[in-house]
Image (cartoon, rainbow, N blue to C red):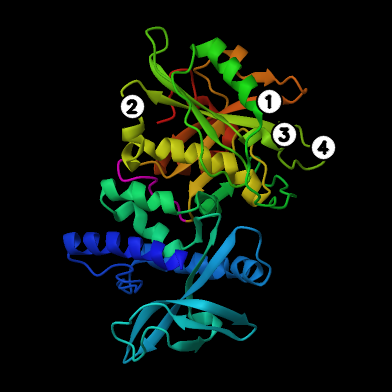
Amino acid sequence: MGWIIALAVVAAIAWLWWRARDTLEIDEGGVSQMRGDDADMARARSLARQEFGTFVERLRAPQPGDEDFGIKAAIGHDGGVEHIWLTNVIVRDDGFEGDIANDPRWIPFKLGDRWRGTLDQVSDWTWFHHGRIQGNFTARAMLPRLPRDQQAQMRAMLEHRWDTRELAHAPWPRDAAMPGQPRPDELSDGDRVLMKAVNDHADAHFGAVPQVFHEIVSPSAHIDLYPYPATAQRPFHVVVTTGMAEQPMQLPPGIEADAHVELVVLLPKTWPLDHASWKREAGYWPMQWLKRVARFHYESGHWLGVGHLLGNGAPAMAIAENARHDSVVLAPPAALPESFHRVTLPDGRAVRFLCLYFLAPEEREALEREGWEAFSGRIDAQRLSV
C-alpha cells in the first residue's frame, strides 16, 4: 500500500538519524521509539488527537484522490508503550481497530494481527490525498531534526497544508472578529489573471524575474514564488507570492480591510536564491513561511491584515535551526515604494501586498505587550524580513 511504502522511506531516514545521534527516536520500521519526555513528540501527538475528527470525517466520506488511511496506536505492554501503525482501520464512537502494519519490537503482536483500542490510544493518523501524506504529525515533528540532505526527501512526501494548523493567530485589534470557515481543500491549478498581473506589476518595479518557483501540488490555492535578486540600487532580495488572493478572505461585516492580499519577504543580498539552497531548511524557511501564511486563510477561515501576528505554535518555538525567530507579523513593506503596495487586476480585484517581518522572542513579547500601534514604529524602511 502507498502509505506503508512511504512510511518505510520515513523509517529508513529516521533509522539513519537515530544511529547518528545514538538516541531512541521515531518510526524504525513504522515503530515509534521516542523518549516519553520528548516535548515535540508530545505536542505532535496532542495535535493529532485534537484533529482526529478531521481524519474520521474523511475516513467515512473519502474525497476523490483519498486512499490508504492509517492510525498510529499507543499500545501498552509490560510497563512501556509502543506506537504502532494500523491499516484497514475502522473508527467507532468508543474506539477503533485495524491491522498491525509492521512487526512490533516489544508488544506481543505480529504483522497482520487485528488490534482494537480506545480513542485515547490514538497517537497519530494519516491518509494520502493525490499522493501527498496528510496528517502524520509525528513525522512533521521529526523533520527539523533530520540531517539537512534528508529533509527535502521527507518534506516532499508531506502535505504542507497541515503546517498552517500549527500557526497561533493573534489578530489586531486583539478582539477582531473571525467569522469565516475553512474552505474546501480542492486542488488548485492557479489563477492565470492573478499570476500575470502580479508578475507584471513586480517586474515593473524590480526588473524581470529570472525564475518563477512553481508549485507542483497545490491544495486550496496555487502558491508560486517570484524571487527578485538584489541590485545596486536595491541591496536586498524581494520574494513575491501569487495565490493567496485567488479567493478573497472572509472579512467580518463592516471591517475595513483588504480581502485580497499577496505577500513579500525582504531578504539580505547574501541570502541564497538558487534551487539547491532552497532544498535545505536553512535556506528555505522564509519561503516555506510565505506558503504557510498564504494558505492560512483558506485552511482556518481567519482573515489576515496589518498587525496580525502568527506564532510558530503555542507556546511559540524557533522557526528553524539557524533562526531565533519564533513568529511573524504582517505589515506594509516599508522598504518598497508606495507604488508597489497595491495593484488592480484586469477583473477589478484590488490586491494589497503585505510583508512578513520575522520576530525574535523578545520582539514578539513586546508586540504582545504594547499592541501593534505602539510597536509599528519599529518597522521602518531599513528593516528587512529577517
Q: Is residue 41 above or below residue 294?
A: below
Q: Are marks 3 and 2 in contact (CB under 8 Å)?
A: no
Quadrant assignment, res 325? top left
Going by the picture, which residue comes out furthest to the right?
A: 253
SS category of the residue bearing label 2: loop
Q: Nearer the viewer, mark 1 or mark 4?
A: 1
Give the Cα distance between marks 1 and 3.
Answer: 17 Å
Amino acid type at circle 2 is Trp
Give the Cα distance between marks 1 and 2.
Answer: 30 Å
Which comes before the other along the chain, label 1 or label 4? 1
Amino acid type at circle 4 is Gly
Residue occupied by mark 2: 271
SS category of the residue bearing label 3: loop
Which comes before the other along the chain, label 1 or label 2? 1
Taking 51 as reference, is 36 left or right? Answer: left
Residue drawn at (35%, 59%) of the image: 142
Mark 4 Cα shell of 10 Å, populated few (<14), some (14-19), many (≥20): few
Taking 308 as reference, is 175 left or right? Answer: right
The majority secondary structure of the magenta stretch comes to loop
Q: Are marks 4 and 3 in contact (CB under 8 Å)?
A: no
Q: Residue 2 or 116: which is nearer the viewer?
A: 2
Give the Cα distance between marks 4 and 3.
Answer: 12 Å
The disc placed on residue 193 is: 1
Which comes before the other along the chain, label 3 or label 2? 3
Amino acid type at circle 1 is Val
Q: Is residue 49 above or below residue 240?
A: below
Residue occupied by mark 3: 259
